[in-house]
């Protein structure tokens, strides 16, 4: 499934397979954040650009200002049993509070099997 925005006589729709409309919440133990999307996800990372050899490092997924709120070396992963959820394990000394936004890097997380006609 893809999302389109805009669209008028002078401007065409902008369509993307990057996921939209997520809801998120802290886990019961406050050690992680669950981000839930309406559709299954897939991660598209270019291993040649990795500075560190693990796709679970949130620095490959999340922009630097959001990353700073997640503590030292947070980890991110699409849940194996729930492919529409991303779990973020907070690092040491996180500063993020409920209702603060986390911004993903562009062109990393996509709706699974999405194609734009």
Image: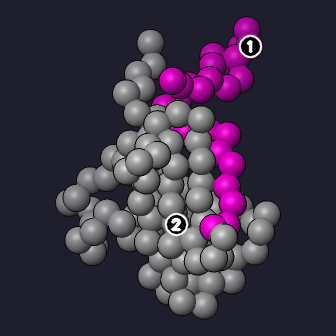
Residue 18 is one of the magenta-drawn residues: yes
What kind of element bears circle 2? strand
14 left or right of 9 in image: left
What kind of element bears circle 1? loop
81 left or right of 50 in image: right
User: Hey, which quadrant is residue 30 in on the image?
Assistant: bottom right
- Tag 2 or tag 1, which sits nearer the N-term? 1
| Image position, residue 102 (x, y; %) | 64, 62
Location of residue 47 with respect to 14 vertically, above or below? below
Question: Neighbour class for label 1 at 10 Å: few (<14), some, many (≥20)?
Answer: few
| Image position, residue 52 (x, y; %) | 27, 74
How far is disc 1 from disc 2 in space, using C-alphas? 38 Å
Residue 22 is one of the magenta-drawn residues: yes
Location of residue 109 with respect to 93 vertically, above or below? above
Residue name at image x 44 percent, y 65 percent = 76
Residue name at image x 44 percent, y 43 percent = 83
């Amino acid at each position: 499934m893809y999302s389109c925005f805009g669209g008028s006589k002078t401007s065409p729709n902008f369509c993307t397979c990057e996921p939209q409309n997520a809801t998120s919440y802290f886990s019961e133990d406050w050690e992680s954040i669950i981000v839930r999307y309406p559709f299954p996800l897939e991660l598209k990372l270019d291993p040649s650009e990795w500075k560190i050899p693990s796709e679970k490092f949130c620095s490959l997924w999340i922009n630097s200002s959001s990353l700073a709120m997640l503590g030292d070396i947070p980890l991110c992963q699409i849940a194996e049993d729930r492919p529409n959820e991303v779990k973020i394990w907070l690092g040491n000394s996180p500063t993020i509070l409920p209702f603060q936004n986390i911004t993903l890097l562009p062109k990393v997380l996509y709706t699974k099997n999405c194609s734009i006609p």
